[in-house]
Image: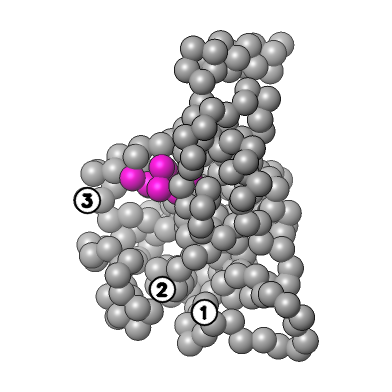
Amino acid sequence: MHAWLTELGRGLVDAVFPPVCVHCRALVPSESAYRHLCPRCVAQLNFVTAPHCEVCGHPFYGEVEGERMCPHCEGLQPEFGVGRTAVLFKGPARALVIELKYHRGLHVVRDVETIFRASPHVLAHVRDGVLVPVPLHPRKRRERGYNQAELIAGALARAAGGTTRTEALLRRVQDTKTQTAFDRRTRLKNLRGAFALAPGATITPDRHYILVDDVFTTGSTLNSCAQALRRAGCRQVDVATLGHG
């Protein structure tokens, strides 16, 4: 009964305010599994499949024999173990993240969850673990009104099911400038000591903790967060992101 009412409500809302694709602005059919990406743009999502880098999750192309260096995380010296990502950060996936981060597009979280549900290697990686969203500095959180990494972690927990849960274990103690214009070395320097355990947070050393963020770029932010969790006693720290790029 509840599901029927939900679908009825969705149909009425769509009839009055037809959903529009965040990437190409086309109307999204009511029967689509995605609510804010049209079928043409859904087909352009670059889902990651094996073989892929075990550190950052970026796919390898062509034939892979033995160990292979990944140019996307070479020299990172990760403090975390394994990294997984669902899609490449371009085209429609990039549009979803931009809508969420910069246009208060909380409505696209549903499509984020749909992407995760179509990424079995990510779900298997996080299932029954503790998802730790990368925190925002309090100033930035006040400006934005929410932390997009928390919303993405929640979507991933729902998609993974089991005992998967989210915990805000970290806080950002340094209000660093945006890192998008810097290379990996500069990012690592800027983010040194930028994160710490949140007040009242407790760590169970033998639990599986997975840091969650929107995009894996150089891995500097995730690495700094992993260092903070390691200092707090975490033994198994991995990473999962929606996109890579």
Q: Position of residue 82 (x, y in %)?
A: 62, 72
Question: Hey, what amino acid is under mark 3?
Answer: Arg
In the rendered structure, does residue 114 fall within the stretch colored magenta? Answer: no
Q: Which residue is mark 2?
A: 220
Which numbered disc covers residue 73?
Answer: 1
Residue 1: where, in percent of width, then height?
71, 11
Q: Quadrant of residue 12?
A: top right
Please say whether residue 77 is visible from this viewpoint.
no
Distance from the alpha carbon under mark 1 to that under mark 3 = 30 Å
**Which residue is at the front of the view, 197 or 17?**
17
Residue of label 3 = 139
One can see residue 28 in this view: yes
Does 168 appear above or below 17?
below
In contact (CB < 8 Å): disc 1 and disc 3: no
**Callout 1 environment at 10 Å: few (<14), some (14 to 19), or many (20+)?**
many
Q: Whole-percent x and y of residue 114?
A: 63, 41
Instruction: Name the foreground residue: 188 vs 12.
Output: 12
Q: Earlier in the sequence, mark 1 or mark 3?
A: 1
Residue 105 image position (x, y, % from top left) = 41, 37
Find the magenta span and give its range.
96-102
Determine whether 204 is above or below 118 in the image. below
